[in-house]
Amino acid sequence: MSGPQSLVLITVDCLRADHVGFLGYDRPTTPFLDSLARESVAFSNAIVAGAPTYYSFPAILASRHPLALGRDVLGLAPDEPTIATGLRQSGYATAAFLAGNPYLSRRFGYDSGFDTFRDFLDAEMGAPVQNGNGNGTRRTRLNRSLAEACHKIGPIGVLYDELYFQYCQRLASPAPSLDGLRRYPAANVIVDGACAWLAGVEEPFFLWLHLMDPHSPYYPPGEALRLMGRGDLTASRARYLNSYWNRGDLGANRFKRHREEVIALYDAGIRWVDTQVAGLVDKLRNSHLWENCVFALTADHGEEFLDHEGRYHPPSRVTEELVRVPLLLRVPGLKQAAPVEAPFSLVHLAPTLLEAAGASVPSGFCGHSYWSQLRSAADWDETGIVECITDCADLFRVEGRLGKRVVAVRERRYKLVFDFGSCREQLFDLESDPGELHPLLGDTEKPVRGRLLRRLRQHLTDSRGHGASERRLRALLREVRLESAQAAEHENDRVRMAG
């Protein structure tokens, strides 16, 4: 391998590590990626640095722990070094095609370093019905009055909620199609945009794609359902399942009846990602770009399906189904027979990718490259740090981000979770309890607890490193300017309406 390599990075929203075939899943979600894994390095214990999306991506793109600039800062700071800024300074063409995730937008600095940046936030997508009730009709006002009265009579309120939900489902207009219900652009839209860009690019290049197909609400294309053998899941059935799964008035036991069907929708979204990634790789091969290209696929976080009696990916949890993600790295001439089992924090992904591509690594990165270990097939001991904030409210306002910190310190076998809100710690032995259902008693494994607590303290000390104060100030100034501009726009709208 000589000269700079091009780099393709694909991130998939909500993709769990245990739902891809090359890490052992028994359903056919990733047949293409499984075949690609045979000429790549797969990581079975890749760990995000934060969850969900807004706490995950500073590590992926900028090799920086998500809370290093403070709890009130989201996204990338202005002028913060990233994969994209480093490669563009080295003469790379850079492009990003992102499937409509608002936390990966220009507002939060993710356009930095990209010549071409499309976040698809202006795409006209369907808004799926969740429970079928309106907001201002006479019928709605009557329902609210009845609901308040029924909930004062104990179990009558629960019965009323169920009857009203079923009533709304039967009144809902027929579902137009799965495509019409989908909230985010499907993977084929994003890949088509990337392929059009590739047609006019010269090497070397950096291409980042973010795909949302496994994200809720779960409306995969009909073709993906057929590929998974679930053509029976029609648009109407999918809408019912999504509406039921989104209910806030039920306990975990009630959701279990539909869990397998909901997972089938989720898995079909993964299969559609796999199908479209295959098309992108075909484009690279046919354009003779593949032989000089580093390719990586990972996720920003996973998804919960009642593993701990929860759904989706709440920001206050750092359980394995949310923080362990797939990572596939393909570099020409490099492959490994079995998945890498050593823990690998995604804070180290950016420097590893840059060194694999033959590019320089910015000095401001927090993580370090594991490229030499991968080339020599060496093992390593890594302690991953995962952090998030509880009780996040309106994240588009600074004051909505000021909850208490939750941090996980994860080794190969043990994992310590510390909740700063309750000052509670939990230690798990992932070897005997991979589902994290039985925390070890407080008087057991004291040396392990001490070691992990010391690592946590070191992380808190180190996370505000060189340049953090300057970057924090620039990020906060950006927030002030954005909020001032929005306030002025709202005032102008008010004046126009009054006039």
Image (spheres, rainbow, N blue to C red):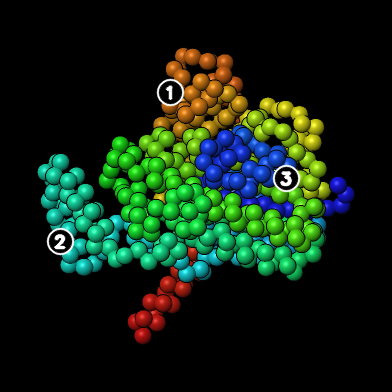
For marks 3 and 2, the one nearer the N-term is 2
Helix or strand or loop: what does disc 2 sit on?
A: helix
Q: Position of residue 425 (x, y in %)?
A: 46, 26
Contact between marks 3 and 2 (CB within 8 A): the answer is: no
Q: Nearer the viewer, mark 3 or mark 1?
A: 3
Contact between marks 3 and 1 (CB within 8 A): the answer is: no
Q: How far apart are marks 3 and 1 (CA)?
A: 37 Å
In the foreground, 86 or 342: 342
Against 430, residue 57 (above or below) is below
Q: Where is residue 35 in the image (x, y as percent from the top left)?
A: 66, 44
- Compared across the picture, whether 223 is left or right of 30 comes to left
Q: Mark 3 points at which residue?
A: 330
Numbered label attached to residue 109: none
Q: Mark 1 points at which residue?
A: 438
In the foreground, 454 or 266: 266
For the point 75% across and 49% down, which residue is it? 294
Within 10 Å of the Cα at label 1, are there few (<14), some (14-19), or many (20+) other Cα atoms?
A: some
In the foreground, 181 or 248: 181
User: Residue 362, can we see it?
Assistant: no
